């Protein structure tokens, strides 16, 4: 059985991160429960050389919840093979009156139930992003 069940890789990765972020920001549910719905207990996520396990990922959600950023995600390219996705996308985030465009190169491994098991990301932030190009949409989430 395919991990992505025939889903378009661009749509899968967009839906994954948008849903995860929306659940974090739109509910008062324990962040650990939300993280566990989207990630395996042995999650390893390395972003720009910084390793996060489950506990660090949960801790990372606290400031995201506090700041309540708005934004959207634009996936430029994504390919899937077996249980893995490689994607290049931009997250447009508005946080505390600051507009950011974060370019992300993502390499992830997912389980058959759609949870993220392993991720490696390289990012580049442009704090001078053109707000006209961002067209921030309330209700579309990103993990920042």
Image: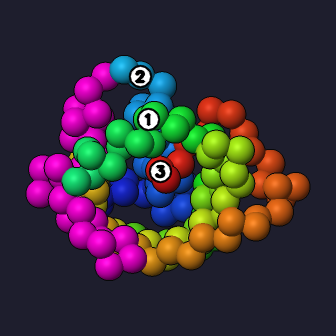
Residue at 49% across, 63% down:
9
Q: Read off the magenta span.
A: 29-55
Q: Residue 23 is drawn in which quadrant?
A: top left
- Residue picked out by circle 1: 65
Q: Residue 46: horizontal and vertical position, in percent?
A: 30, 71
Assess disc 1: are there few (<14), some (14-19) or many (≥20) residues with their C-alpha within 10 Å of its C-alpha: some
- Residue picked out by circle 2: 27
Locate the N terminus by quadrant.
Answer: bottom left
> What whole-number distance in Å separates the C-alpha atoms at marks 2 and 3?
15 Å
Residue at 51% across, 44% down:
18
The reply to whether discs 2 and 3 touch (Cβ–Cβ < 8 Å) is no
The reply to whether discs 3 and 1 touch (Cβ–Cβ < 8 Å) is no
- Residue picked out by circle 3: 143
From this view, report whether residue 5 is shown above or below residue 67: below
> What whole-number distance in Å separates the C-alpha atoms at marks 3 and 1?
10 Å
Q: Residue 140 is drawn in which quadrant?
A: top right
Given residues 126 and 133, the one toward you in this image is 126
Residue that sits furthest to the top in the current view: 28
On the picture, is 119 further left or further right than 95? left
Disc 3 or 1, which lies upstream in sequence? 1
- The mark closer to the camera, 3 or 1, is 1
Does the segment drawn in magenta span residue 33? yes
> What whole-number distance in Å separates the C-alpha atoms at marks 1 and 2?
9 Å
């Amino acid at each position: 059985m395919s991990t992505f069940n025939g889903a378009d890789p661009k749509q899968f990765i967009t839906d994954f991160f948008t849903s995860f972020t929306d659940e974090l920001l739109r509910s008062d549910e324990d962040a650990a429960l939300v993280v566990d719905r989207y990630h395996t207990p042995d999650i390893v996520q390395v972003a720009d050389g910084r390793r996060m396990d489950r506990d660090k990922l949960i801790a990372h959600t606290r400031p995201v919840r506090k700041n309540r950023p708005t934004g959207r995600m634009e996936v430029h390219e994504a390919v899937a093979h077996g249980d893995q996705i490689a994607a290049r996308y931009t997250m447009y985030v508005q946080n505390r009156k600051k507009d950011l465009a974060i370019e992300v190169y993502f390499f992830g491994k997912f389980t058959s139930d759609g949870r993220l098991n392993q991720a490696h990301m390289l990012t580049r932030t442009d704090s001078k992003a053109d707000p006209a190009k961002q067209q921030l949409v309330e209700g579309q989430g990103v993990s920042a």
